[in-house]
Image (cartoon, rainbow, N blue to C red):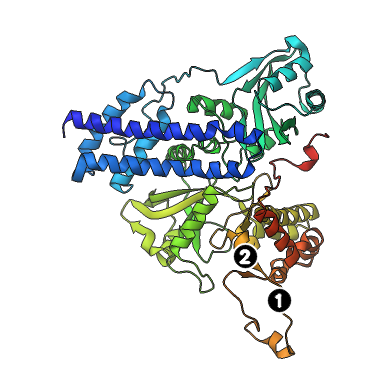
Amino acid sequence: MSKKVSERIAREVLKHFVTYRTFFKAITDMAQQRFEQELWLEIQQAASDRIDLYEQQLQKATDSITCIIGSDTCEKLLWNEIKASYIGLLYQRDDSELAETFYNSIYCKAFKHRQLTDEYMFVHTSMAGCQVSSSNAIYRSYSMEQGLVGLIGKILDDCGFNVPWENKKRDVVSLVRYIQQHIPLGFDAGRMIKVDVIRSVFYRNKGAYIVGRISFAGGDIPFVIPVLNHNQRVYVDTAISDQDQVSIIFSFTRAYFMVNVDAPSEFVSFLHSLIPSKSIGELYTSIGFYKQGKAEFVRDFIDHLTHSKDSFVIAPGIKGMVMTVFTLQSYPIVFKIIKDKFSSSKRVTRSVVHERYQLVKRHDRVGRMADTQEFTNFILPRARVSDGLLEELKQVAQSSLVVEKDTVMIKHLWTERRMTPLNIYLDKALASDDEKAIFHVVNEYGKAIKQLAAANIFAGDMLFKNFGVTRHERVVFYDYDEIMYLTECNFRKIPAAMYPEQEMAAEPWYSVAPNDVFPEEFTILTACNVKVRKIFNELHGDLLCVKFWKEMQEQVSSGEVVDIFPYRKIQRFTR
């Protein structure tokens, strides 16, 4: 293959990448306008459309390149030449890491996710050590020259909203009061160096978020200022400066932010300085570059395997009827594989399971569903796979397995942040009689179900084993094989039995259609313990009534988008 052809293909890859970036930016740039006009349903649709962009443009690029290469798409030497030509096109770009990942996606399509070496693709970035510098600074810096009131007022003005503030003076006073009460170092002008605020406002659902840091001689404090819109007048809803709470705002359980990003690596580096507990991959994902988040995860995972020795084992908890799950205890991730055969009680197929995981990817997760990353032909070192796990995989997922001397390849899996299964968390809390923990997670469990319903998601199988508890003690749903849109459910009351024998029969005495749901049956969910049942019934007993579910359906069908923000109501400022 001539050098001219490899250069042509490299330019073709970059052309489609640039098109993807252009479309991505166009959707993102409209976020402010949608927020200001309170177009909440359009915001959710735009978020879904932006996720779809990558695969759409990737397919167009692959088709175009296949036409050029013809039957030689799997010629390794050719891709070595293409990669060399492609690298030469990236030096002037401030998003080269995204461009490399786009190239990788095309290469993986050609090689069916095999032959993954740095010789032909970017297992590791080619730009390591290269300084990326965008034409615009990532953040604005402020000093105390104007005093605290003047500084806060300037920050709010610089957001550049095209709608008026509801009461800017009140918001400034609220922020001053918050700073005086909550900034641990105290707002001592003599000790403060500066305040840095990211130039771009972060938009997600019904909120706009100002993100920055306060720098003192002794260190930095991150902060987030959520701004809401009511009747096209904006106001500050609260302020967050605790690092753990800032981390929750960027959680893997929420939709991706819409935020204008010129130089992604610089942008993510700044975010990482604010919340170092978040990995680089998680931060890329949080701002919409989920494929780059996946690439960074793989690099981090490879590095972790090099510097660790423990084995992959079956994940703790009750085994699933559709998925088998394993983990590496030294790494905060679980790996989920679809079983070859499902329990007879499960009325789903492999394709349906895949569709439901895609639904969760594209849907607003409202802080109650875990994001996942999907992989094809995922390779593990054989020496690190425990015998017990390998035997389990052979028994329940043999069709997804290719075992060789040094490797175990899994044809298809999802990765997900590891959490403590709710049933295990509750058992420990009950065993130690930790009433505070029991009350908290039972309440969280009910709130999770309600907030999912408000987002038009019916969880389906709501057993405790299908929920997890995060390190921030939030309850999150993570078993998606039975989820469906709430509006597709038919909520019914169980008909009264005509005679006692009907109630004693093994089968129901009434007809049950596929989408029929009987909330009265949810009592089985808390039958494990009297204390748990009592708390649940007191706090969330309405979940056992058809009335609640029908009202929620009407609310969703009317187009109402419920306020579900990543902070507690008690933290909100008084208006």
Residue found at the very far left of the displayed protein? 2
- Image-based side of 175 in relation to 271, left or right: right
Q: Position of residue 451 (x, y in %)?
A: 68, 52
- Image-based side of 93 in relation to 110, left or right: right
What's the distance in space between the residues labelled 2 and 1, CA to CA? 15 Å
Instruction: Please name the residue shown 81% across and 64% down the image.
Output: 534
**Secondary structure beneath label 2:** loop
Which residue is tagged 1? 494
Quadrant that contains the C terminus: top right
Residue 165, by quadrant, is top right
The reply to whether dot 2 and dot 1 touch (C-beta < 8 Å) is: no
- Image-based side of 90 in relation to 167, left or right: left
Please tell me how crowded label 1 is: few (under 14), some (14-19), or many (20+) other residues with Cα within 10 Å: some
Q: Does residue 239 appear in the picture of this structure?
A: no
User: Can you say whether 503 is above or below 429 in the image?
Assistant: below
What amino acid is found at the position of numbered circle 2 in the picture?
Answer: Cys
What amino acid is found at the position of numbered circle 1 in the picture?
Answer: Ile
Instruction: Please name the residue shown 48% across and 25% down the image.
Output: 263
Instruction: Please name the residue shown 70% across and 13% down the image.
Output: 143
Q: Position of residue 71 (x, y in %)?
A: 19, 46
Q: Does residue 196 appear in the picture of this structure?
A: yes
* Dot label at residue 489: 2
Q: Which is more toward the observer, 251 or 402?
A: 251
Q: Position of residue 319 (x, y in %)?
A: 54, 64
Please tell me how crowded label 2 is: few (under 14), some (14-19), or many (20+) other residues with Cα within 10 Å: some
Q: Position of residue 18 (x, y in %)?
A: 39, 31
